Image (tube, rainbow, N blue to C red):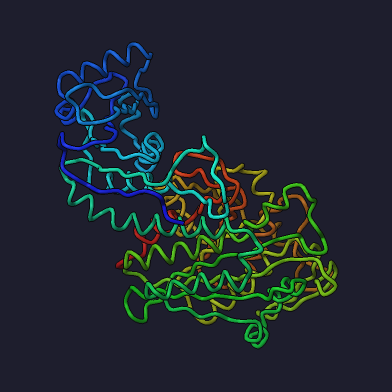
Amino acid sequence: MADGITITFAPVGRAGGGDLVVFVGDDLALSAAARDVLGGAGADLVARAAASEQFRGRHLTALSLPAPAGVEADRLVVVGLGSDKDRGKIEWPVLGGFTAGKVSGRTARVVLDWPGAAITPRDAADFALGARLRAYSFDRYKTKKKPDAEDKTGSALTLMLPAHAEAETAAGDTRAVAEGVTLARDLINEPPNVLSPAEFAARASELATLGVEIEVLEPARLRELNFGALLAVAQGSVREPRVVVMRWNGGRPGEAPLALIGKGVVFDSGGVSIKSAGGMEDMKGDMGGAAAVVGTLHALAARKAKVNVVGAIGIVENMPDGASYRPSDIVTSMSGQTIEVINTDAEGRLVLADVIWHVQQTEKPKAIIDLATLTGAIIVALGQDIAGLFSNDDELAAKITAAGEATAEKVWRMPLIPAYDKAIDSKFADMKNTGGRHGGAATAAAFIKRYVNDTPWAHLDIAGVGMSSTPNEINRSWGAGWGVRLLDRLVRDNYEGR
């Protein structure tokens, strides 16, 4: 879906129409630029209106009032930034999202300045990123719009600041990231009757227009390559699986790529071990990891990132059928390791096992990061605001943690100890696909780890954040597109141009 907003950059000036947005702290002081745009009458109006409405300029609060005579605007919106401490740790995408929400569906000029601020072009670009993400909506299947529904279409923001030209250049990169998040959100929000494995593969293949090399492995090829674990999961569905390998070669020729692997279960009924009816409709989002990988490849290619990255997604549907795999089945994965199936609803790890093994053997990556809406156990442990991180490499884990802090897509490192690996030993095969209820997220990670050799590897369990996540200032969508911003930042800070 389109992000529903137009953003331009301009020098600070009085001319214009629509809404006018200015920022104040808890002292209600306006910047020199804001006073200049408003004039004396406007500045006085802010002080009087704030007293009348008991507006104290607290962090992320807003006051809207008719623009005074002499100010070329329809409405004045005053956004509070709080204390000096609050202003010292501004999260620019969050501020952009909050501001865009206050002028949704309208034309507005934003004086991006406040007393004591030192706003860089990158800050302004991140503000624009947040505004774009806030404007997202997924309504393509609505035939009628409620009269009182918030109109998010047609928003137009002009961000006014001295370094407007440099900010516009920097915003090119953040727009690419916003497009990647939008793509991921669209994929997650699509109904499963539309987003079949074949359709998902087709949409991922559209990245070819950006210069991404695409390889689609169809069922016959998957059988030739012995994707035994993935094919076992898929065999209960009439909609056959796909694996898509996407290569962005923006770095030095021959340099080993970073590998991003995504779980793409387009609908997870649980299979024979069927889930309860309550909440099963959310299982259309069980491909959130794959969506994040596709969105990240879009972002990197759209901004021409100087890095080699391979993204691979295993796309299946897990359904109950006469042909479904069963509890107590033993399947042979691509690696040759055998798996006793204890629960057919522990399917994502089987998909990841084969895709990780394939990428490891064919691409020889410098590091592997997989993303998967894998376990309810991680939601019990961490809730819906933070993802679980498991890794065999301290340096890689630290890099991911730092990128998560920088983007507010936060992770928390979880333990991987020998006891978790022992828990998945099987009496009849090399391993079983679940270690039981206790430590479920950790034993799932231990299962995946058995398919990683000596390559630095990290597993992100995004079950809590990837779908039905907590609404915030930059996301009002059911599908958050979580992970795109984190991975883009990880690449930018640690792999690009190196």
Place of residue 64 in the rendered image (x, y in percent of width and height, measured from the top left): 35, 25
Q: Residue furthest bottom?
A: 224
Q: Quadrant of residue 2?
A: bottom left
- Vertical relation: 69 (above or below) 490: above
- Which one is nearer the viewer's eye here, 90 or 442? 90
Instruction: Tell me the quadrant of the picture where the C terminus can be found.
Output: bottom left
- Which one is nearer the viewer's eye here, 463 or 187? 187
* Horizontal arrangement in the rendering, residue 154 relative to residue 352 (left or right): left
Tell me if I can see residue 103 in this picture: yes
**Residue at x 48%, y 44% (from the top left corner):** 475
- Vertical relation: 130 (above or below) 445: above
Q: Count the labels in the image.
A: 0
Place of residue 283 in the rendered image (x, y in percent of width and height, measured from the top left): 68, 56
**Residue at x 33%, y 28% (from the top left corner):** 79
Place of residue 18 in the rendered image (x, y in percent of width and height, measured from the top left): 28, 35
Q: Quadrant of residue 486?
A: bottom left
* Horizontal arrangement in the rendering, residue 357 relative to residue 46 (left or right): right
- Which one is nearer the viewer's eye here, 338 or 296? 296
- Vertical relation: 160 (above or below) 251: above
- Vertical relation: 333 (above or below) 38: below
**Residue at x 76%, y 47% (from the top left corner):** 278
**Residue at x 54%, y 76% (from the top left corner):** 360
Q: Quadrant of residue 37?
A: top left
- Which one is nearer the viewer's eye here, 153 or 3? 153
Tell me if I can see residue 459 in this picture: no
* Horizontal arrangement in the rendering, residue 410 relative to residue 18 (left or right): right
* Horizontal arrangement in the rendering, residue 232 relative to residue 175 (left or right): right
Place of residue 77 in the rendered image (x, y in percent of width and height, measured from the top left): 32, 28
